Image (tube, rainbow, N blue to C red):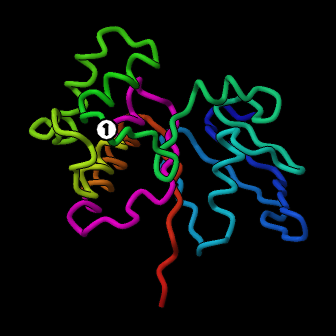
Amino acid sequence: MMQNLSIQSKGLQKSYQQLHVLKGVDFEVEKGSIFALLGSNGAGKTTIIKILTTLLKQDSGSATVNGFDVASKPEDVRRSISLTGQFAAVDEMLTGRENLVMIARLRHLHDPRQVAEDMLKRFGLTDAADRRVSTYSGGMRRRLDLAMSLVGKPRLIFLDEPTNGLDPEARIEVWKTVKELANNGTTVFLTTLTMSH
């Protein structure tokens, strides 16, 4: 595998009963780039993310993520990535701060409280830090979602339709964050719906 690749997919295929969702998908994603997978609902975007993040096994073909084969080295893949979007593990009953501290602890980071503090500041959530997430607006939840997925500085982050259901202001914020991530060397793999005409 080439050294500068974060993801390599060759001939990925996946079917559910008679439905062929993926029919030989090939692509490569360079380290530190932003890779967008466009497609309408049902086009197989989420299926690809689930295969790349080891939540689902492909029927045939191969994929490597950060140099690890998704089928034979799933634990290594999971350790080297972060996943957000439809798969977010935000706990509604906890505050924003508590959610971030919990993730930092799960990732065995030194000083989880400081990690949470830094993320709250970075994503403009300091004022809402001690409110329950159930009181957050859609834009705030998405920012918390992003913050949680970035705890521990992952090399590769998967965003499944990161701007879905957000107002224009919140969308701009998300795209700004995505650009920042790539500028700092994180590879961003995202899915988005194609514009309907």
Q: Mark 1 points at which residue?
A: 93
Q: What element carries label 1?
A: loop
Say left or right for 21 vs 31: right
Above or below 196: residue 81: above
Residue at x 28% of width, y 27% of height: 98
Q: Looking at the picture, does residue 91 appear above or below residue 151?
A: below
Residue at position x 33%, y 51% from top?
A: 142
Residue at the outermost top position: 110
Image position of 127 with respect to 112: above or below: below
- Is residue 169 in the magenta section? yes
List the single residue furthest toward the bottom: 197
- For the question of whether residue 85 can be seen, the reply is yes
Q: Using the rendered image of the protein, determine whether residue 8 is visible from the camera's viewpoint.
A: no
Left or right, 193 with reference to 55:
left
Residue at image location 76% in from the left, 42% down from the top: 63
Which span is picked out in magenta?
Answer: 147-172
Please provide percent x and percent y for residue 69: 77, 32
Residue 80 drawn at (x, y percent) = 57, 27
Q: Considering the image in quadrants, where does the N terminus appear? A: top right
Q: What residue type is labelled 1?
A: Met
Q: Farthest front residue?
A: 93
Where does the image place residue 120, in percent across and percent down from the top left?
Answer: 20, 33
Assess disc 1: are there few (<14), some (14-19) or many (≥20) residues with their C-alpha within 10 Å of its C-alpha. few
Q: Does the magenta stretch include residue 47?
A: no
Residue 39 or 94: which is nearer the viewer? 94
Q: How many marks?
A: 1
